[in-house]
Image (cartoon, helix red, strand yellow):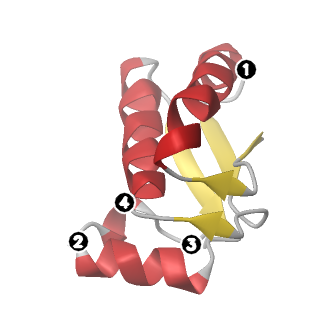
Amino acid sequence: MLTLPGELVHATANEALLVLTPALEAAAETQVTVDASALTRFDSTALAVCLALRRVAERAGKSLVWQGVPPRLADLAKLYGIAELLPAPA
């Protein structure tokens, strides 16, 4: 499981990707859960990080399952037309 940090804004995005990318690549599972429940301070940059993680997962032959996506982040994804990229677990 990957856990997004509590703060994911422009200033922290690169640091988050430096931690999350190798963890995702090293994950033994082909379906990796991303826990976003810790996110309390974020902006649209968080969506860019989510999309980058999705690209990494696709290159590694993995899929992502999102849990704990804050409603405000889900609203931003809808606003940008990418809500289907952050689906809630079934």
- Kindly check if marks 1 and 4 are in contact, taking CB atoms under 8 A apart as contact: no
Placement of 9 over or under 79, stated as above or below:
above
N-term-proximal mark, 1 vs 4: 1
| Mark 3 → mark 4, Cα distance in angstroms | 9 Å
The residue pinned by badge 2 equals 80
Sequence order check, earlier mark of 1 and 3: 1
- As helix, strand or loop, the secondary structure at mark 3 comes to loop
Amino acid type, mark 3: Ala
Q: Nearer the viewer, mark 4 or mark 2?
A: 2
- Please identify the residue farthest to the left as the structure is shown: 81
Q: Nearer the viewer, mark 1 or mark 2?
A: 2
Which circle marks residue 85 in the picture? 4
Q: Which residue is mark 3?
A: 88
Looking at the rendered structure, the kind of residue marked 2 is Tyr
Q: Which residue is mark 1?
A: 28
Q: Secondary structure at mark 4?
A: helix
Instruction: Report the side of 18 relative to 87 (left or right).
Output: right
Q: Disc 3 versus disc 2: distance between alpha carbons?
A: 17 Å
Q: Is residue 81 above or below residue 34?
A: below
Q: Could you tell me residue 56's position as x and y percent?
A: 43, 25
Among the two numbered marks 3 and 2 on one chain, the one whose residue lies closer to the N terminus: 2
